[in-house]
Amino acid sequence: MSGIVFIISAPSGSGKTTLTAELRRVVPNLEFSISYTTRLPRGSEQTGREYFFITREEFKKMIGEDQFVEFAEVFDNYYGTARSFLREAFVRGNDVILDIDVQGAAQVKKRMPEAVSIFILPPSRQELESRLRRRTVAENAERSQLTGEEMPEEKVEAILQRRLQEASREIENYSQYDYILVNEKVEAAIDVLQAIVKAERVKRSPHPRDAEEERVLTAAELAERRHMMEKVQSILATFDFSSTRS
Ligand code: 5GP
């Protein structure tokens, strides 16, 4: 029997890492797929933990051997989800979470229409900008400690603007997802994320539903795309999409 594939996509700065780490802590029988990537490890990242870090040649060989369920080029690097990871997780009786970009999400949905997709949105452009600014400044400080070189302010600003544009571009793809989650308050967002995972399990279970399961189904339903349109529109209104279409 096959488990459930949950796809989570979010522009950087939407708080996805915190949410998925907490989800992993609170929900049993859920494995996070460790992707293969050609990008270099950052900070304390280790191969086999955050990613399997491989060369472009190795990645291309894996493509040739049809080892990926999906792969994409993101920020000039390849990222891919291994078929073997999904197979092994299902054999262990677990469901799987894929933290992948919008291109990968579209490929998985095409091959596995029963996969459940979730898009995480920041509450507004202003909030996204301040989160990305904090991250970019912190990365610069970390880098200058390591190398003794500080990036000029204009360069930091240019990186920030590029990230904001990329995030805006990703956000425009929200409509291909089954569920939309707005990360306003972390605790509330985790509750919704947890409800979605549990509700999808309940939907596939042959057992009669109890009161808690009905509650979870209702909570998850409120995050379905069709119920989120008004909220999404108010968030999209804070973005200037004309600058991302050039
Ligand atoms: P980062 O380099 O910051 O860890 O990730 C950059 C982007 O690549 C994120 O949007 C992340 O979701 C995406 N990503 C990570 N692994 C995969 C993967 O296996 N496939 C695809 N398509 N995207 C991935």
Image (cartoon, helix red, strand yellow):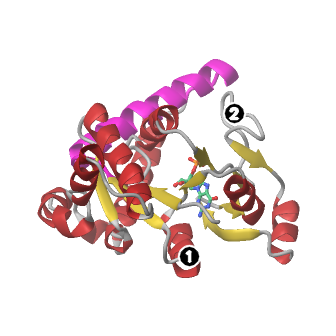
Q: Which quadrant of the structure image shows residue 233?
A: bottom left
Q: Which is more N-terminal, label 1 or label 2?
A: 2
Whole-Å distance between the Cαs marked 2 and 1?
A: 30 Å
Look at the picture and state if 93 lies above or below 104: above
Q: Which mark is residue 112?
A: 1
Q: Position of residue 66 (x, y in %)?
A: 80, 75
Direction from residue 109 to residue 192 in the image, left or right: left
| Residue drawn at point x = 54 percent, y = 61 percent | 4
Q: Position of residue 104 (x, y in %)?
A: 56, 68
| Residue drawn at point x = 38 percent, y = 65 percent | 169
Would you say residue 144 sits in the magenta stretch? Answer: yes
Pointer 2 local density, CA inside 10 Å: few below 14, some 14–19, many at least 20: few
- Whether tag 2 and tag 1 are in contact, CB under 8 A, the answer is no
Pointer 1 local density, CA inside 10 Å: few below 14, some 14–19, many at least 20: few
- Front-most of residues 214 and 185: 214
Chain part drawn in magenta: 121-150
Look at the picture and state if 193 lies above or below 202: above
Please name the amino acid that badge 2 sits on.
Glu
From the image, tell me which residue sits under label 2. Answer: 45
Q: Main secondary structure of the magenta part?
A: helix
Please name the amino acid that badge 1 sits on.
Met
Displayed-image quarter of ligand 1: bottom right
Q: Quadrant of the N terminus?
A: bottom right
Q: Which element is circle 1 on?
A: loop
Q: Position of residue 218 (x, y in %)?
A: 21, 54
| Residue drawn at point x = 66 percent, y = 68 percent | 71
Q: Quadrant of the C terminus?
A: bottom left
Question: Which mark is nearer the camera, 2 or 1?
Answer: 1
Q: Which element is circle 2 on?
A: loop
Direction from residue 164 to residue 67 in the image, left or right: right
Exactly how many numbered labels are in the figure? 2
Direction from residue 4 to residue 137 in the image, left or right: left
